[in-house]
Image (spheres, rainbow, N blue to C red):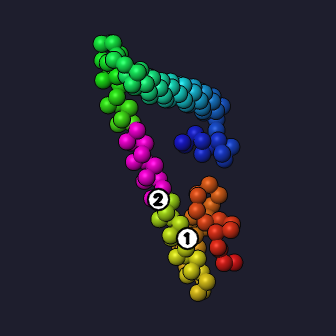
Amino acid sequence: MVLEELAGRGELTDEQAVELAELRSKVAKWKQQRKAKNAKYYQGRKAAAARVEELEKLKERGPLTEEQAAELAALQPKAAQRKQQTKENSAKYHQGLRVAADRVVVLEKLKERGPLTEEQAAELAALQLPGCGVGGEGAGAAD
């Protein structure tokens, strides 16, 4: 962090510049490895979910082999847990969007009555940023 600040001000020695370049290289390599590891992890999860689905379809058609039944028994709880976690995360995300949208409505009504405080104006601006999912153009902002 200190080296980055010095570099920003142009105050690095040659030795520090070399060190910074090496550190940046290590960070880039670490990020690439982490990205590959995450991709492999999610591919494994998708494959397991697909396998559960496949085994459940086979089970509907008739009895499974012992190996298939054991595999399904091992995979099903994990798949169900991941599905429940995904459902909970989605619910939390959408609840957050609803709360933010409600807050935008309150702030916009306050704005109609008079000027907002600096904090309120900053909050409204932040909630209306593109990609925030609430407010923004066409959301009833009174300008």
Q: Is residue 31 above or below residue 133?
A: above
* Quadrant that contains the C terminus: bottom right
Q: Quadrant of residue 11?
A: top right
Amino acid tagged 1: Val
For the stretch drawn in magenta, what is the main secondary structure? helix
Residue 23: x and y in percent read: 57, 30
Kindly give the residue lying farthest to the bottom in the view shown: 113
Residue 45: x and y in percent read: 45, 28
Q: Upstream in the sequence, badge 2 or badge 1?
A: 2
Region in magenta:
83-96
- Mark 2–mark 1 Cα distance, whole angstroms, equals 12 Å
Please tell me which residue is depicted at 66% across the width and 78% down the height of the picture: 142
In the image, residue 68 lies in the stretch drawn in magenta:
no
Front one among 11 and 46: 46
Q: Which residue is mark 2?
A: 96
Residue 44: x and y in percent read: 46, 24
Labels 2 & 1 near each other (Cβ < 8 A): no
* Quadrant that contains the N terminus: top right
Residue 112: x and y in percent read: 61, 83
- Using the image, tell me which numbered label, if any, was put on residue 25: none
Amino acid tagged 2: Gly
Disc 2, SS: helix
Q: Which residue is mark 1?
A: 104
Front one among 114 and 16: 114
Please tell me which residue is depicted at 38% across the width and 32% down the height of the picture: 79
